[in-house]
Amino acid sequence: MNRKERRAALKQSPPGVGHRVPPAGDSIGHLYAEAMRSQQQNQVPDATRLYKRLLVLMPDHAEAHNNLGRLLHAQGKLNEASAHFAQALALMPHLFDQFHGICGTLVGVLPPIGQALRQTVAAWPKRATINQLLGSAGLAAIATDPLLLCVLQSTPVRDVALERLLTSLRLSLLEAAADGKTDEVALGFCCALAKQCFINEYVFATTPAEEAQVERLKAALGDASATGPTILPISLTAIAMYQPLHALPDAHVLLDRSWPLVVDDVLTQQLREPWQERLLRSSIPQLTPIEDDVSQRVRQQYEENPYPRWVNVAGGVEPIAIDQYLRGMFPAAAFAPLAKTEALDVLVAGCGTGWHTIGVAQRHRDAQVLAVDLSLSSLCFAKRMTPAPLSERITYVQGDILKLGAIGRSFDVVDASGVLHHMADPIEGWRILLTLLRPGGFMHLGFYSEFGRRDVVAARAFIAERGYAPTPADIRRCRQDLLETPLRSVARFSDFFSTSECRDLLFHVQERRMTIPAIKAFIAEHRLKFIGFEFDQATLQKYRALFADAGWSMSDLDRWHAVETKYPDTFSGMYQLWLQKN
């Protein structure tokens, strides 16, 4: 999926929708209710005992892990709390979007990292050493913390200070590898950091000296691969912190050797899985030709940089009917129920690497999804990552929205979040998708806001003026340069923190932005029903209160335009809107 779709997927589900909490009538539900009651009454020992008992019966209960983590943290049992927070994140990966809060939790359960962050900020751009950052305890002070390891291996780090701390630690580990100095703790952390760098596509800043040292390690590794001597695991993983292992010459011979388990996991991420994606290319059918010049250039960008390189699928999602989902999100909206009692036909137009598509299939009961994208590389990633139970309900195909009008199909739901604004004419793409939507069907769209992307537009002008190219090296350099200017505000976008997402954010080959009046005009022209804008629950509650106090309807687009004019960052992510076809 593309970046914008991912943001849509990360919006919190309506109350009562999403991660399953078993009903109070069974033993699990009863235990959870009792634990919650004890926690609310500050009966800490009882609540702790009840949550632990619940997790013996149901180890994948995400909310119980999170609540137990809070209780253990309050009791000063930091490592145990960290482990439960890590479990909660693994089960609810959408929470990684709240990265600022995760950083706060991390500092709370791992005090040494707070001091290291302060030291990093004070020293930057100089790379402080491990001893300067972590004192006499060294890397062991943080290297085995469960929450830190979970973050590193699950999502791009989306905080500038933490990114720079990891950049400094990476240099120290590279120097240790060059000297042949290693231990089990350093190797384990080096592997976790290599996974992080692969996930963020090597977006961390480098220096010429570092790059030269990596090349020397690669040369030594090449000699060892050819002649057969032992390859030090730390040398291999040090390279993997700077470059993907699948790009090494004769990389396949690495799989013929025996490695420690943590190193073999890196080989799976950086060799086995990319090769599996390549094998899937022949299994993706082409639904339509891709002939439009803009479509071809957009496809090329995503062939080079499919994104995001996500890791975990949400678990325990209870599917519900589309009517119930929308009613939970928009309780006061006037829309006609679809009342679908059989398979829900869904088109995801621009599915990218599959995160959003999988979320759609999980949360909408009986959804049968046709997922279309320009990029074969993105589709192969999506197909590899699709859980087996969903694979029969999602069909991935390559095609162009401009050609979808000829496929002879119609759908109950059409989803195109963050896609149309990368077309030469977004309005034309919208019209084509509307022809595929059945009467009474629902459409979910995401558009860039002209108001909300003022700093992005300024950053794109900065990039053009300075002549940065959309290459990994220039993207790394551009990011660091932007952080030294007033345009550092673009770091508020989560997309700033990986190479492919930063390219999409600041270097995209095609970008068009919309306004609410333009959206209103299209809706009026085609006699569509505007259901509402999608926000996370906290923001949605704020706007519900604002509109209720003012006597406004949340479906009044003129009022929304007035709100955005007064508060230009209201839709800084995108306009995420739901419509119904009459």
Image (cartoon, rainbow, N blue to C red):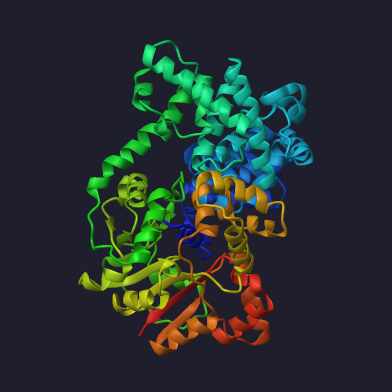
**Residue, x 46% and y 82% (percent of image)?**
530
Vertical position of residue 18 compared to residue 499: above or below: below
Residue situated in front as seen by the camera: 477 or 374: 477
Vertical position of residue 130 compared to residue 399: above or below: above
Q: How many marks?
A: 0
Q: Is residue 182 left or right of residue 306?
A: right
Q: Which residue lies most toward the left here?
A: 408
Residue 487 lies in quadrant: bottom right
> Which quarter of the figure is the C terminus placed in?
bottom left
Residue 280 lies in quadrant: top left
Vertical position of residue 546 compared to residue 48: above or below: below
> Which quarter of the figure is the N terminus placed in?
bottom left
**Residue, x 39% and y 80% (percent of image)?**
580
How far from the left and from the top, in percent, is residue 82? 63, 37
Residue situated in front as seen by the camera: 96 or 286: 286
Q: Which residue lies most toward the right here?
A: 122
Question: Is residue 106 visible to the viewer in this orientation of the structure?
Answer: yes
Question: Is residue 341 visible to the viewer in this orientation of the structure?
Answer: no
How far from the left and from the top, in percent, is residue 275? 33, 36
Vertical position of residue 495 compared to residue 161: above or below: below
How far from the left and from the top, in percent, is residue 270? 42, 34
Q: Is residue 9 left or right of residue 40?
A: left
**Residue, x 72% and y 56% (percent of image)?**
485
How far from the left and from the top, in percent, is residue 535? 56, 68
